Image (cartoon, grey):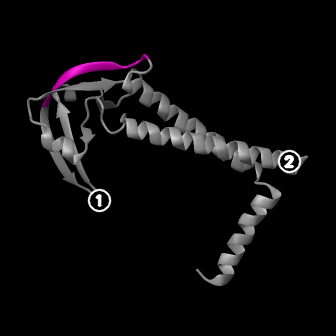
């Protein structure tokens, strides 16, 4: 990046801080908050903190791995032929420990087609904490941009 482009970028950022952000930036953070909030709600359902999940005990019928741009480890159960019975992706460490014929708790949320491994990556406490932190950051930026925009308008 050349010096002129860096100076121009810094001037634009300073202009946002000094003059207040545009109104669409607050709307963008509101949309991000909505999407993160919906993901947190689904995670809370999957973890059982909110009613709305179905847990079923299923047997692993096959395992596999695919080499895409990133290696993908998966398994499917006897329910694979039924609605929502697609492959379930897992980490390599968890996949290594799984055996065909092993029984696992599979979680579904009514109205959604996806199935999840109980305590899998999507519903892990670390993922929930990350999303909660992300929501806090989005909310902070939303209220900051909104307050700066209101001060700039009045």
Q: What residue is shown with label 2?
A: 151
* Residue 75 found in image quarter: top left
Provide residue 117's location: percent of width, then percent of height: 27, 31
Q: Secondary structure at mark 2?
A: helix
Q: Which residues are magenta?
A: 51-60
The answer to the question of whether label 1 and label 2 lie on touching residues, with beta carbons closer than 8 A, is: no
Provide residue 141's location: percent of width, then percent of height: 66, 47
Residue 27 shows up from this direction:
no
State which quarter of the image contains the N terminus. bottom right
| Label 2: few (<14), some (14–19) or many (≥20) C-alpha neighbours in 10 Å | few
**67 relative position to 6: left or right:** left
User: Is 92 a magenta residue?
Assistant: no
Residue 152 shows up from this direction:
yes
**119 relative position to 57: left or right:** right
Marking on residue 6: none
**136 relative position to 49: left or right:** right
Residue beneath the point at 68% across and 71% down: 9
> How far apart, in angstroms, are the residues tagged by discs 1 and 2?
47 Å
Q: What residue is shown with label 1?
A: 69
Number of callouts: 2
Residue beneath the point at 37% across and 20% down: 53
């Amino acid at each position: 990046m050349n010096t002129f482009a860096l100076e121009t970028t810094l001037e634009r950022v300073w202009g946002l801080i000094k003059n207040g952000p545009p109104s669409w930036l607050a709307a963008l953070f509101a949309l991000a908050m909505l999407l993160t909030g919906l993901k947190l709600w689904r995670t809370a359902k999957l973890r059982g903190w909110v009613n709305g999940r179905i847990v079923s005990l299923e047997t692993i019928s096959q395992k596999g791995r695919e080499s895409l741009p990133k290696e993908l480890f998966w398994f499917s159960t006897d329910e694979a032929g039924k609605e929502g019975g697609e492959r379930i992706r897992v980490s390599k460490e968890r996949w290594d420990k799984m055996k065909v014929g092993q029984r696992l708790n599979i979680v579904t949320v009514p109205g959604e087609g996806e199935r999840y491994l109980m305590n899998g990556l999507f519903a892990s406490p670390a993922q929930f904490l990350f999303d909660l932190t992300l929501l806090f950051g989005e909310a902070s930026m939303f209220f900051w941009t909104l307050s700066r925009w209101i001060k700039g308008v009045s």
